[in-house]
Amino acid sequence: MEVAKAAAARQRTHGDVIGLFVGQPATPAPAAVREQAARAVTDEVLGYTVTNGIPALREAIAAEYQRRYQVSVDPGQVMITTGSSAGFVLAALASLDVGDRVAMASPGYPAYRNTLRALGAEVVSLPTGAASRFQPSAEMLHHLPDVPQAVVVASPSNPTGTIIDPAELAAISAWCDEAGSRLISDEIYHGISFGRECVSAWQFGRNSLVVGSVSKYHSMTGWRLGWLLVPDDLVDAVERLQANLAICAPAVSQVAAVAAFTEPARAELEGHVARYARNREVLLRRLPELGIDSFAPPDGAFYAYCDVSHLTDDSLLWCEDVLAATGVALAPGIDFDEDEGRRMIRLSFCGQTDELNEALDRLQAYLRR
């Protein structure tokens, strides 16, 4: 967010910012979604919905799990939330108490770590690196001195874009079941992958909480709409929490999002994924030309997490200098890894290909100074 502020200030004074720090698509919601929203605003009251979300949307999401993963989901186990962020809060509140330990990979999405700490949980970091493709393993969990009350996984991951191998996710799920630890699986980037399979935790058991969203694949970040797949034993708790904390997710977003799971929308969205794939190929080819060659090639999402320790020992200051010198905004790694992040940066490639090439041209000139 500090990078966003600095980039906005640079844009006001120079008008030349290319944002490779932002974690949201550069494209609007699918046309079918926007048309549905316009009809809803014109023709519907759009008051509070039922707490767990309108039936049509819960049924559409359940059908999507059947189509994508061959997993049968009861729409009654789908909770529509105000973005995946609120879904994660509900998952944590329903399954944890103050002082509980939660294991998650480092690097990882900082808001999860910060949210857990704000709720009184203790975060147990699982250090990872390029050798493990920045993903945790059941073996890492087995060697923890104390069993955590929950384990958070993210696949594809933010900030690395790597995907957990299906067999490894199955092993993590089995370990959690045996240990009595609740698995919370962040699957919000599903749909965006490059030749590698995304699997859902519910393919390996129904004790986990699955976090989903229309933000990334569906290009609907600002619509603030996500969902949880909720195990039977937590459905009542999650519904009660949702009723007290939010009443319901935004009604207009719910009505519009039903169209996000239709074939016309999917055809449009696959075009976005094809662009992300082209951008990924640009990065894989050009980053080594810039001397940045230490990273795990992203399997999905739209991030590359890169080692820049040969250039700096303070990625925050380095990113500030790059922005001031070139107008290119990057995300320093300290957000994602409190220990090793000062030598890392996250680069987002969800924008237009010509802008990505222009940003890399500027970085190349900067590094040749």
Image (cartoon, rainbow, N blue to C red):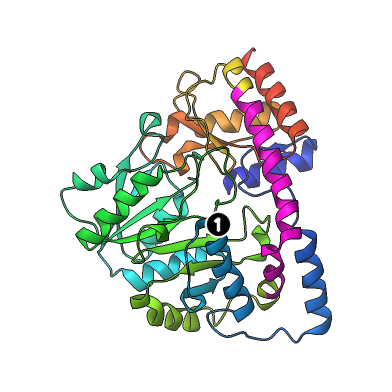
Report the residue at 36% width, 57% height from top: 204
Where the C terminus falls, by quadrant?
top right
User: Quick check: 286 left or right of 118?
Assistant: right
* CA neighbours of label 1 inside 10 A, class few (<14), some (14 to 19), many (20+): few
Quadrant of the rendered image containing residue 80: bottom right
Point out residue 160 in the picture as x, y percentages from the top left corner. Answer: 49, 38
Q: Percent from the top left, x then y, of residue 178?
A: 21, 59
The answer to whether 29 appears left or right of 163 in the picture is: right
At x 54% / y 21%, what residue is drawn? Answer: 292
Q: Is residue 344 magenta?
A: no
Q: Does the magenta stretch include residue 260?
A: yes
Image check: 343 left or right of 217? left
The residue carrying mark 1 is 68
- Which residue ends up furthest to the top in the rendered image? 368
Q: Tell me which segment is drawn in magenta.
A: 255-284
The answer to whether 275 is drawn above or below residue 244 in the figure is above
Q: Position of residue 14 (x, y in %)?
A: 79, 35
Q: Nearer the viewer, residue 195 or 242?
A: 195
Task: Residue at 75% x, 87% y: name it.
Answer: 45
Query: Most prominent secondary structure in the magenta stretch?
Result: helix
Q: Residue at x 38, y 41 (%)?
A: 135
Tell which of 70 and 179 is nearer to you.
70
Kind of residue at disc 1: Arg
- Report the residue that reaches farthest toward the left: 145
Image location (x, y in percent) of residue 120:
32, 65
Judge whether residue 346 can be spotted in this image.
yes
